[in-house]
Image (cartoon, rainbow, N blue to C red):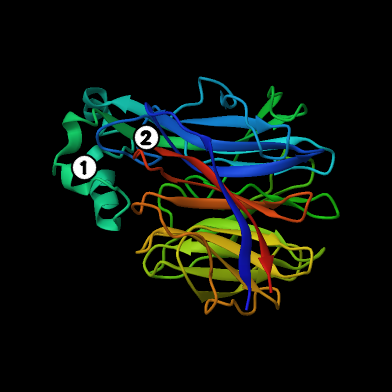
Amino acid sequence: MPEIRDIQHQILFKDPFSYCAHAHIADLGDGEWVAVFNRAVRRPVILHPPNDPQYYNVLMRSTDAGRTWNTPRVAPGYDWHGTECAGLTVLHDGTLLLNQWRFTWYPLETARKLAHKVALSFPTDWVQALKAMGELPTNDAIPDDPAEFVPWARGDGGTFVHRSTDGGRTWDETIPIDTTPFSGGYGMRGGVQLANGDLLLPLSDVPNYRTVFVVRSSDGGRTWAAPVVAAAEAGKEFEEPSLLALDDQRLIMLLRENTTHFLHQCTSTDGGHTWHGLRPTPILGYPPHLLRLPDGRLLCTYGYRYVPYGIRAVLSVDEGRTWDVDHPLMLRADLPNRDLGYPASLLMRDGRIFTIYYGQDTDGVTCIQATSYTIEG
């Protein structure tokens, strides 16, 4: 039976005046790591991305393999606000990519004047949807008409990739991704570069959040081919995929599904050109992150928004055909509410696993946290 040992918890970044959540992490090599997460003004009623125009993606750095972290910097710059959760990808040549979806935003009065000619989403649309999903930790404080405390509306946006050749200290290029026929593409796990150099970036169809597709670049993210659907099914709502290459041709993808809350998965055997085998897994929680361990097992970490609230992981010994949900690994089972999760993991030089995530601390401040541990058995 697998068990976790040598557990160490950390708070990586905390600001009592900010709401910080939804982290992703990447290893640049030689003990240098970067993490990206969402940061916004802390409000009496917390609004998850993408429902606040003051959300920024911020990047922080560790040069000692996660022990200490510098002050977060806005990425790629202060013009990039009102963004969804972001993802990081490290290419074979060391280039760092940051993928983002950014909405357009309007003052509420302006939006009402434009509503007859511009596709807009108003506060009542998405706040009520979040209440129905149970995403907000302060549902009782939300009036039926939230316009008084949410005086803005959301329009369309765009999918972008930013390139950095100095580990995210500066950003050299910004490339828009055409996701036609989908209205946009949102992904918070970065992509995978295959042995042949092709880069695959899994995205979901923002703002509908029902279909997951993959876009491909053969030149390091400078140009992108048309989307290829990986997961779509009537009555299901797929988003927030995590992609892992098993070898040069075989890939596995786990994804969030909002009607059942069980993770689903699909596979490709031709380097991501086609996808098949879409099916539910027995893993209850979301969203997922996939990591291959040195012994070949797959580790899936995910948020568990049920009592006891926390962060969990499960293992697969057969490359994702089955998952050992009978023996979940409890990274955290002591978080105070369901405002948590979005874990992402990487391997440390000493063989331990480092998992970053978000959740409230004992002061009630939502912050970026991490757990490092070993797996025995």
Q: How many marks?
A: 2
Query: Which of label 2 and label 1 is nearer to you?
Result: 1
Q: Is residue 285 visible?
A: yes
Question: Can you identify the residue that label 2 sits on?
Answer: 155
Residue 307 placement (x, y as % from top left): 34, 64
Residue 211 placement (x, y as % from top left): 49, 59
Q: Residue at x 66, y 37 (%)?
A: 67
Residue 127 placement (x, y as % from top left): 26, 44
Residue 223: name its quadrant.
top right
Report the Cα–Cα distance between label 2 and label 1: 14 Å
Label number found at residue 152: none
The relative height of residue 220 versus residue 297 in the rendered view (above or below) is above
- The front one of 46 and 360 is 360
Q: Amino acid at mark 2?
A: Gly
Question: Can you identify the residue that label 1 sits on?
Answer: 124
Q: Residue at x 25, y 51 (%)?
A: 131
